[in-house]
Each structure stands twice: as structure tokens, then as C-alpha cells.
Amino acid sequence: MITIDDFKKLDIRIGTVVSVEKIPEADKLLKFIFDIGGEERQILAGMAEFITDLDSLVGKQMPVLLNIEPRTMRGLVSHGMIMAADVDGTPILLFPQKEIPAGSVVM
């Protein structure tokens, strides 16, 4: 169990996908660029085997965790984490019910 104060430490915001591409020579890694309300963030995610139509994600919005330690993978730095549901080991992306301003706080 965590307290509400622990939860409030998480900076989860809505990001809008600006671009997404597969990382060459990496079977699972995708590089996303998100608009987080006037700031762009590069976030890497090991979802390539589950997402085939990358172009369909451009313009989509999804929750991202921003205040997690940066992580270097394949020479690229990830500055966040995409929030997704895990269904039997498959990530299912989450989307807001309607379009909202990029950078909106998830609470």
C-alpha cells in the first residue's frame, strides 16, 4: 500500500505522439517523441513486436510518466515511460476518452 502523498510524487501527464519509429537492429524497441504541452520528450518503449502500424499512433494521446530516472538503451536516452495495461504479457496502450491539452496532469 502507498499513501496519497506517495501517489502525488508521480508526474503522469498526457502526451501527444509527434513521431514514432522502430530502432534499427533492435527487435523490440520503439522511439517515441511526445509533445508534453510545449516540451518534447523522447521515450523509448519495448513494444515493437506488439505494434505494427506506427503511423496510426502519430497524433494519438496517451499517459506518460515523466519523473522517472532517464534510461539509456541502444545509445538513446529515454526520458519517461509510457503507461499501458498488461494483458497476458501484451501491452495495451491507453488513450483519453476525448482529445485534451497535451501536458494535462493525470490524477
Image (spheres, grey):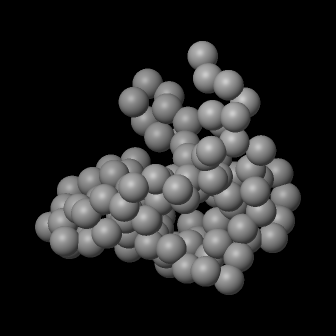
Tell me: 29 left or right of 11. Answer: left
Q: Is residue 7 left or right of residue 83?
A: right
Query: Is residue 56 or residue 20 the one in the foreground?
Result: 20
x, y percent for residue 62: 64, 57
Dividing the image into 4 quarters, which one contains the C terminus? top right
Q: Position of residue 7 (x, y in %)?
A: 66, 36
Q: Residue furthest top?
A: 1
Q: Residue furthest bottom?
A: 38
Give the residue displayed 69% in from the left and 60% down from the top: 14
**Is residue 67 among the parts visible in the rendering?**
yes
Quadrant of the rendering where the N terminus is positioned: top right
Q: Is residue 48 visible?
A: no
Image height of 45 relative to 88, above or below: below
Using residue 49 as the reference point, say whether residue 105 is left or right of it.
right
The residue under the point 69% across, 52% down is 95
Residue furthest front in the image: 5
Residue 70 x %, y %: 36, 61
- Looking at the image, is 34 positioned above or below residue 69? below
Number of numbered discs visible in the structure rendering: 0
Query: Which residue is depicted at the point 39% across and 55% down?
Result: 69
Q: Is residue 52 above or below residue 9?
A: below
Q: Residue at point 68% right, 83% down?
A: 38
Front in this rendered view, residue 91 or 82: 82
